[in-house]
Image: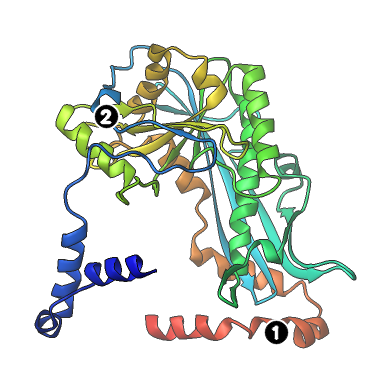
Amino acid sequence: MNNWKESSEEIFEFKKEKELESPLRSCIEFLQAHKNEFQNDDVPHVLGSGDKVFQISDERIFKLPDCNEPKRIGFVDGGNAPVLKSADFCICLNRVAGALFNENKYEQLSQMPEVIEFYSVTILTRKVSGPVQFVTKLFPREEHHARYLPKMDIVIPLMDTVTFRGKVGFLPKIEKFASIARRFAEWTYGREFIAQEMKEDEIFVRDGSLQTGQAGESILATQLYEKAIETGVIVTGLSKTCRLFTNRGDSLISVIDSLASNKYPKSPWYYHPIYKITRVDNQADLYFVKLHPHSPFPFRFDIYIKQSESMTQKEREHVISNLMNNSKDLSFPGYPHGLIKVDQLSRVAYRELDTHKILLLSEFSDEHHEKYILPRLHSIEAHDLLNKIRKN
């Protein structure tokens, strides 16, 4: 305890005259004192018990070769936004979209809808003798979209969501459960996308990592992987953000990017291996990639681990170079154009929500709305009203 106190006092010690002089300057001085040069002899922080990490080294950085054999690439992403919400229920509009690119040319889907839409309804409820739990149910907006959605409800006990700090429990915002529903739907839609629209040796890319977070999600991911193995489609995921860090507390991807920028300052590159992961919730072989020589952004890139382990280095490079070949869009060089496309297709704009809100409210009976729904909406609508005042 004393050691912690001494070290914390050392870290947070500031000269009083500088604090009085400028609190902004004090903030910057604190940051500059502790976030400066990267340590190249660092190691990735262990993600879970049993995971193996590899020492950071520029020997793991490889220049990406040109893409001499373009392959068809399929992309899937989803979006959502709340329409009606209270403290104990929420209705959200969700979209999941898919797109195919063949030699960087957009190709219409032949068998399935390009975009599916559904409402997700989350309620906080309790069975007679059971615990309080969040239950999310999915309702397709078009009947034929139902086949692309998970069949089961998503049930998460309240206690699984609470982070305890001392004796105080912090509840998640109920609208966050729509993101879980959307992720579940991305796996089921993606499975059908692979089955109906893709062929052997083609590449499937989902927005985000291949890691799963909720009970039941890994089952849906496994179904997608099984379909990919059956059809010979390579499953990957690209993450716009990466929060992995090193044992010294530095951003892991930033340390690698610093090394790679010195080794290959004018070339796309990839870094591998990073971790050896054997957990059921994370079936990914992790890479870091920079997909354009003029891009400032490196990304985390996952390949389904069973497929990655069966590939040669040349075959892995061929997968990544195909993604590099799709990352030349001038609006965002270094980020796949296919992911830009499905983001645009699946994004739910806030200007749409009022129409959906009117449609949903019109379905309530006047008595039910007045007695039971309106009082619940008032539990959190005051904050939304303040936001509207502020915008005006």
Disc 1, SS? helix
Residue 195 relative to residue 305: left or right: right
x%, y% of residue 207? 48, 41
Is 1 situated above or below 154?
Answer: below
- Looking at the rendered image, the disc whose residue lies closer to the viewer, 1 or 2, is 2
State which quadrant residue 121 falls in: bottom right
**x and y percent of residue 113 in the render?**
63, 38
Residue 247, x across and y down, in percent: 35, 46
Query: From mark 1 to mark 2, how far is it between C-alphas?
Result: 59 Å
Tell me the amino acid under the disc marked 2.
Ser
Image location (x, y in percent) of residue 381: 57, 82
Instruction: Give left or right: position of 244 versus 370.
Output: left
Q: What residue is rendered at 67% in x and 66% in y?
A: 91
Which is more N-terminal, label 2 or label 1? 2
Vertical order, 126 against 234 (above or below): below
Give whichever of 326, 228 is nearer the camera: 228
Q: Which residue is mark 2?
A: 57
- The answer to whether one can see residue 169 in this image is yes
The residue indicated by pointer 1 is 374
State the SS at label 2.
loop
Residue 336, quarter of picture: top left
